[in-house]
Amino acid sequence: MSLLAKLQSKTQEEADVKKNKEAARKDQTIQPPTQPAPKKKPDKKPVIKPDPNKELKSLTFKYILKERKDDDVEDIVHDLDDIISTIIIENELKPKQDDLEKLKKELANDLTGYGPINPLLLDEDVSEVMVNGPDQVYAERNGQLELTDITFRDNDHVLAVLEKIVAPLGRRIDESSPMVDARLQDGSRVNAIVPPLALGGPTITIRKFAKDPFTIEDLIRFGTLTEEMADFIQACVEAKLNIFVSGGTGSGKTTTLNVLSSFISNKDRIITIEDAAELQLGQEHVVSLETRPPNIEGKGSISIRDLVRNSLRMRPDRIVIGEVRGGEALDMLQAMNTGHDGSLATGHSNSPRDMIARLETMVLMAGMELPVKAIREQIAGALDVIIQQSRLKDGTRRITSITEVQGLEGDIIVLQDIFAFEQSGIDEEGKIIGKLVPTGVRPKFYERMEYEGIHLPASIFIERESH
């Protein structure tokens, strides 16, 4: 702000204060005195620190684009000290030594990685990164969101990082195509939305995935489930039951699906179908399919439903669908009902009962005028187990129920919890104390497991008395 603008602002503020005082005096002469209203605590707003190197950064990038645009990135990074020194001398700048070191790191991240958020992507403790425009970056650690001190120069800087993410995938993002789903080289999921749809500036959400896929032992260690439950779901996969993992956004459905998929026999031919390929299966015979968005003319899109129907012609032993959210639900249920046992899928819902209702709605989205009873017969005949996963208030991700789909009685699909999460309290750190416990009901498919040669002790389903 210029000196003139500051003086004008100060004069205006003084005039407003004087005007408010006069208005208050008038009110006091007319109205009787009242009790002062309790003071409200001001809302805490994120403090955005000014970037002391903004000018130097801008000059450095202009220099690189003008003088070194054809050079190899590694050579530019190697010469950063000389480049910055040249710019400081030419422009008579006097940056602090600490600021210089920080600037070099930021420039190296911009040139070799994904800009200012590169350190967050390399940090193994960070599970999610959210960029809300150039001045606000959040990170999720241990299930809790925290505001970082990371900022971008401006909207164009955020867009440059976005372009670096989507360009290698053949995707584009601009005003004519302002939304995109993509993935990083390590499999992390990226969603981006830019102006004019995002009013606060380009917005990026990155769901990170571990370099090494989580195993069932990891989920037990995290407290997502117990050892008994782990043995049970492994037996369900090996017995070729059709399993649906349901839960809210960020509840860990894809991680659980990946763990479930790891129990599939190495002899099976597995077809995976996803919007953005995220599953990391270690089996030998895996065919991964990925949807394709429409081109600039709005043509050429390939949906999940198209891939599900095509997969049936690919002689699959197992079909694994990353997420069911539309008309592909009908094709998935038909596949499960026509010999493709052992299929796995995920979907968004708050409970197993809600998942059944959502599946009914999604089947209708396929455009088939089917009676409700016929849809419910398809669902009851196809699904065997629904695993409900939730993200609790303390940020932890837990399996909160494992439910059997027992069949159709009249017009109602009968569901029976085999295991359910019981909360016993909250510890001093605010963490929820509880675990998944058996309900005492033995599932109807227990005999089917025995027939497949999979033996589980009957005691696993017996509710133990807590001491």
Image (spheres, rainbow, N blue to C red):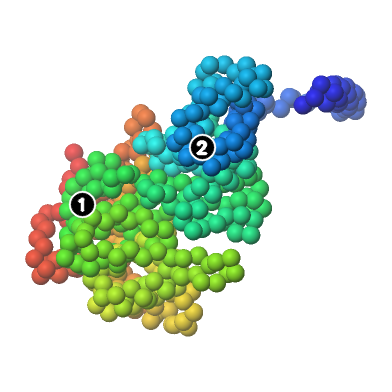
Q: Quadrant of the C terminus?
A: top left
Pointer 2: what residue?
110
Q: Residue at x 67, y 25 (%)?
A: 39
Dividing the picture into quadrants, the one containing residue 245 is bottom left
Is 194 rendered above or below residue 70?
A: below
Residue 159: image location, x then y, percent: 58, 46
Q: Nearer the viewer, residue 439 or 124?
A: 124
Is 228 rendered above or below residue 73?
A: below
Badge 2 density bin: few <14, some 14–19, many ≥20, Cα 10 Å: some
Q: Earlier in the sequence, mark 1 or mark 2?
A: 2
Residue 398: image location, x then y, percent: 32, 47
Dividing the picture into quadrants, the one containing residue 338 is bottom left
Q: Amino acid at mark 1?
A: Ala
CA separation in Å, label 1 and label 2: 43 Å
Q: Which mark is residue 230?
A: 1
Is 351 rendered above or below residue 379?
A: above
Tell me if I can see residue 21 in this picture. Answer: no
**Could you tell me which secondary element the residue under label 2 belongs to?**
helix
Badge 1 density bin: few <14, some 14–19, many ≥20, Cα 10 Å: some
Q: Residue at x 46, y 53 (%)?
A: 168
Q: Is residue 452 left or right of residue 42?
A: left
Q: Nearer the viewer, mark 1 or mark 2?
A: 2
Tell me if I can see residue 433 in this picture. Answer: yes
Q: Nearer the viewer, residue 168 or 199?
A: 168
Q: How many marks?
A: 2
Q: Is residue 48 left or right of residue 144?
A: right
Q: Quadrant of the N terminus?
A: top right
